[in-house]
Image: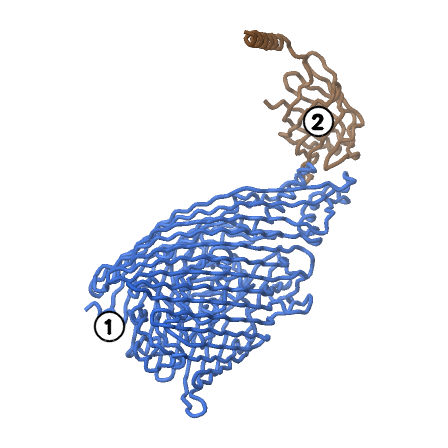
Amino acid sequence: MLVALTTVAEAWHTTETEQARLPKSAENTDAHTLIKTPANRTDTLSTYEIPEVVVNTSPKQDASQAISTTSVGMARIRSERIEAVRDLSLITPNLYIPDYGSKMTSSIYIRGIGARIDQPAIGLYVDNIPYLNKNNYDFGFYDIRQVEVLRGPQSSLYGRNTIGGVINLYTLSPLDYQGVRIGVEYGSANTFNGRVSVYEKPNDSFGYSVAAYYDRSDGFFKNAYDNRNCDWSHEFGFRNRIVWLLRNSWSIDNTLSINNVRQGGFPYAQVDSTGKGTLPVCHDDPCSYDRFTLSEGISIRHTGSEMEFSSITSYQYTNDEMVLDQDFQPRPIFTLIQSQNEHAVTQDFVFRTRNRAKRWQTLCGLFGFFKYNDMRAPVTFKRAGIDELILENINAGIHHIFPDEDILIRENQFVITDNFKLPTWGAALYHQSTLHLNRWTVTAGIRFDYEHAAMRHDNSAELNYRFTMTMPEYRPLVTTMSGKERLSFYEFLPRLSASYRFQSGNLYASVAKGYKAGGFNTQIFSDILQSRMMNDMMEDLGVYPEGSPSASYDNASATTYKPEHNWNYEIGGHFLLFDGSLKADLALFYIDCRNQQLTVFPPGKSTGRMMSNAGRTRSFGAETAISYSIADFTLNGSYGYTNARFLSYNSGTTSYAGNYIPYAPTHTFALSGDYSINVGKWIDRILLHCDLRGAGPFYWNEENSLRQPFYSLLGASVSIQKQNWTLSFWGSNLTGTDYDVFYFMSIGNSFVQHGKPRQLGVSLQININTL
Amino acid sequence: MKKFALLSLLFCSVLFGCEKSESETPEPDVKEGTYVGTVTVDQTDGTFFSQENVSLTVTKTSDQTIEMKMMKVKFAEEMPLTLDMTVSGIAYTRSETKSLISGDNIIPTAMGGEFPAYTITDMSGEITNEGAIRFSMKCGSFPLSFEGTAQK
């Protein structure tokens, strides 16, 4: 009885045992009937692709869990041109990942939760390997078999930084597919990408794959200063996966990935004096981002008759450098070079029962991680910056008494050196029990999470100055600041859910606590040292301006920010209707958030930014997704509504209670249709695809004085298939919609980044199956 | 035995030395240290500006001179800043209960160098042995007085 009742619910999540029944060849169309999940039945592209089965191989997830999930298979990944994590934006309700800045800036907002810098709101796992550094989230997708977005806090199983959810990516396994896959694409802005991958299975228990890709683009935005494109990019990636099924039910799955990025980026345009238009992108100093990452992860799994054991070990190395003209103006004001060299290791042990006939299922886990980041972030003040950001402030007071006298700085540029060493480690113990009672499933989980973070900082600046009235010669001034700060967090992260299954779906309710780690505001140190330098100069002179506001961040201990916590209350349901041709999901949620982490820009002509804990926020909303398939037509749609506001947040001078939380869209919307036409002789079939995605409105600041109205983007493609090749002509933002994806302030000036314009292209995909 | 004799000699010399220093009473001298008091400046327009809790350090620089440093002082309500001002070469003479101070044509230093526009003239006052200080002077064209007590 229990098995029968779970059939519908588990149709969404084919488990590993089903995965083992996958067809041997991607071209084996008969094999598609083996597993009639809603996904493959509704996906007309799957016939010529690798079968669209759900390949959930997470040792933590279970089909019976009451979670809002968006799963995207390989065919939809291709038809909707999901080429990176950010492209999951909008097709997942209430998930918004704006495409701005560089591949470093993967800001994720979900259900009103998110942050521009530091800790991510969503965890990212690739083949169950956690990506600890948000800087690594943006990489080119290739041969991603399945994407699974778990919405709502997943902290009881995944721990830190999964306060808004988890994205699980599963790459194509060499045990599921054998052959050669080649893809080339050319599009607007001289954009080219090429992908090649080889999958081999020498015997039934061993398979390996090698995949590589290269992307390049001239970029879409011109820097008016030198009339060159500023957002050019080159990216290279490599992945090697080895899967080995050993005797006695042991298996080893090893994935090694390398990614290298060189790009311009940061096409930020200054808002003009009317506040309604923008000036051209124009900056005199270069902007770029370089990144090298290496990820090595090994999963060892033992599947017994009663228990399953998994050990997932990973090592990640990140070496990146961001070069910024941080004033984004055609004047020599100030620049930043931020480089990071980070090593991270993780270890996760998971034990869980696997006898589905038993009413009680348990899962226990032990997780630990350590990462060490050596960060250098020198800020160079140039002549105009020295005059306007430093001397203007100092001389304002001096001129009240001595209007004809000045303080001068001899250097045309000087460097504020900011060096940081950031070791962080954590450990967690977690448990989850699931009780099946006829149609009911009750799941309770709890996780104890401990994290310790430290920051050793060494900051200094040196210059020569003089006061024209009293000092005939320049005098050296050296300002230094060094120290160590520590943070520790203990968290108990419970989750409780109940679901009720019926013939055509299930209904569920859940309550869960989420947690985002605290940290250090390294990006405010140049402001701190600049402030200290001015104080040192004043003290050296024996002059103390009156009434100058004392910055709240004028010492290192004030640069920490606290963890963010939320409670997510949710009800929802999954429905399969009309013999499974219509799949629908619905969720209603309410989130009570304490100490929400927000990026704020200190008042005045400040040069940094910092994370601040908003007092309290709340967010409620609704999400729905449908997938409908009839004959050769497939329709996918999603809609998300979020009403996220401050309940109490005072910046020190202003209360923002009642205002919308910045950067989080109120509405997200996506609708796509795929239609397949069988042709016959010269070509096998024509595939038509059309999608419309929209988001907004967004408020850019806490005052809610600036906003981006709702916008939508139209995309379409026409694909021609013949045996093992597919030729596609595609376009995105076909209507040429003007919209902004990002807003920020630098030294009191407002900037935006415009969304990418209309893009057109052609792509060719060839699959050569060897079995 | 030889070692014992040497140690005894050393002990006696230390003891003698201690007794000698305790029996001497130091010559009363100008009382150095930090004073806190009120600065009053005649604005020469019939009004006066006062600033309380101004710190002033007195440091002896020779047998006849001292240096005074006024910390974070302002001389008019409209001044948007306070500053440290040092007056060196102030002459003093001792009496039994106090030191009399005086000075004329002293260029003070402030804001990193000499400040001839605020040359000190007609300075006179006293520092008592009990730790009271009072003096008056002209700072440029502005008559200024200070009255305070030593911080313990």
What residue sits right under mark 2 in the picture? B68
Residue under the point 69% across and 18% down: B30
Q: Is residue A65 visible?
A: no
Provide the secondary structure element on which disc 1 rests.
Answer: loop
What's the residue type where badge 1 is placed? Answer: Gln
Where residue A8 sits, quadrant-wise, is bottom left
Question: Chain A shown in which color?
Answer: blue
Residue nearest the observer in this picture, A205 or A762: A205
Task: Tell me the quarter of the image containing the C terminus of chain A.
Answer: bottom left
Task: Give the Cα distance between marks 1 and 2.
Answer: 93 Å
Question: How many residues crowd mark 1 within 10 Å: few (<14), some (14–19), many (20+)?
Answer: some
Residue B62, placed above or below residue A399: above
Residue that extends furthest to the left in the rendered view of this protein: A1
Of all residues, the one furthest to the right in this rendering is B105
Identify the chain of the residue marked 1, using the numbered disc in the image: A
Give coordinates of residue B3: x percent, y percent: 56, 10
Q: Which residue is mark 1?
A: A503
Q: Quadrant of the N terminus of chain A?
A: bottom left
Q: Position of residue A732 (x, y in %)?
A: 52, 76
Q: Which chain is brown?
A: B
Please, what is the three-letter code of the amino acid marked with disc 2? Answer: Met
